[in-house]
Each structure stands twice: as C-alpha cells, then as structure tokens.
Amino acid sequence: MDSDSNRICLCPLEGIINTIAKKWAILIITIIGNNEKIRFNDMMGSLEGISPKTLTDVLKDLRQEGLIHRESFSEIPPRVEYSLTDEGKKLREAMVPLVQWAEMRDNLHQKKCNAASCQSISCPSKRIVRRKKRGLAQK
C-alpha cells in the first residue's frame, strides 16, 4: 500500500492561504455571497466586533486576490457595492463542506446561534423564527 496516496499537496495554498486564513475573510466571503451585492455598512452590521479599518483591510486583500469585486458609483453620497468574482464564488462553494462540518461539530452552531442575524440557510433556529413570524409555530 502506498503511504503517499493519502497525502495532500499544500503547494497550491501558498499564495492564497495568507489571505483566506485571516480572522474575518471567510465570514466576509460568506456574507457577500449570501447577499450577491452588499455595501460596506451592511457588512459592518453583519460582522459583530469587526472594526472599519479591519474590514477595509480584509476587503482590500480579497480584492487583490481576485475574490471580490468593488463597484463604485458616482453619486452623492458615494456608494460602493461588493460582490464575489467567479473565483470568489468557487471559493465559497468549496467552503460549504467546512461550514457544514463546523455546524455539526459538537452541535456548536445551535449553542452559539443568534437566529435573528444568522446567515446559515440550514439553521434550525432561523426556521423557528420564520414560523413564528408567519404564525405557524407549533405549540
């Protein structure tokens, strides 16, 4: 049996790992992908605890890696929207198994979830909130 058959070559990660391993990068990619297009202040509201400078820095890094697109509009006040590039969408799809694993691990998601601001499509707490809003909550 070949012991090298289970090894994964990490060389392709060398360039991108420094960007996506930053504390907020995966969350930012997820939030942008969940919204298709999103403005800076809307991201700030979704990312509890991030500073404007940190968000700006991570957005800049993600943009330099070609994962997000920044569109500026010539309006007063100025408007900027962020969206995922095709590469960003591919990365987000690749992250789905990681997110699913994290949700299942030790039932962590249910322990930490705030259903009102949860970004997870499969969140059980979010389904309960939706039922309550529609008056369908089970008694």
Image (cartoon, rainbow, N blue to C red):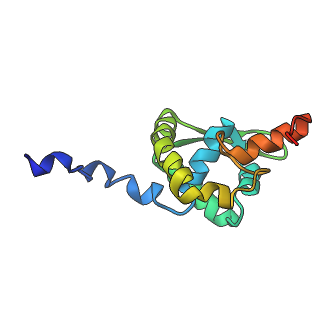
Residue at point 52%, 46% (across, down): 100
Q: Is residue 85 left or right of residue 132?
A: left
Please provide percent x and percent y for residue 93: 49, 37
Residue at point 65%, 65% (across, down): 53
Closer to the camera, 40 or 21?
Answer: 21
Closer to the camera, 51 or 78?
Answer: 51
Q: Name the outermost residue toward the left.
A: 1
Residue at point 24%, 49% (across, down): 8
Q: How many marks?
A: 0
Q: Is residue 89 left or right of residue 37?
A: left
Which image quadrant for residue 132? top right
Residue at point 82%, 44% (across, down): 129
Please provide percent x and percent y for residue 55: 64, 59
Closer to the camera, 35 or 63?
Answer: 35
Mark yes or no: residue 72 visible.
yes
Which image quadrant for residue 137? top right
Q: Quarter of the image containing the C terminus?
A: top right
Q: Name the outermost residue toward the right.
A: 135
Please provide percent x and percent y for residue 104: 54, 51
Mark yes or no: residue 66 visible.
no
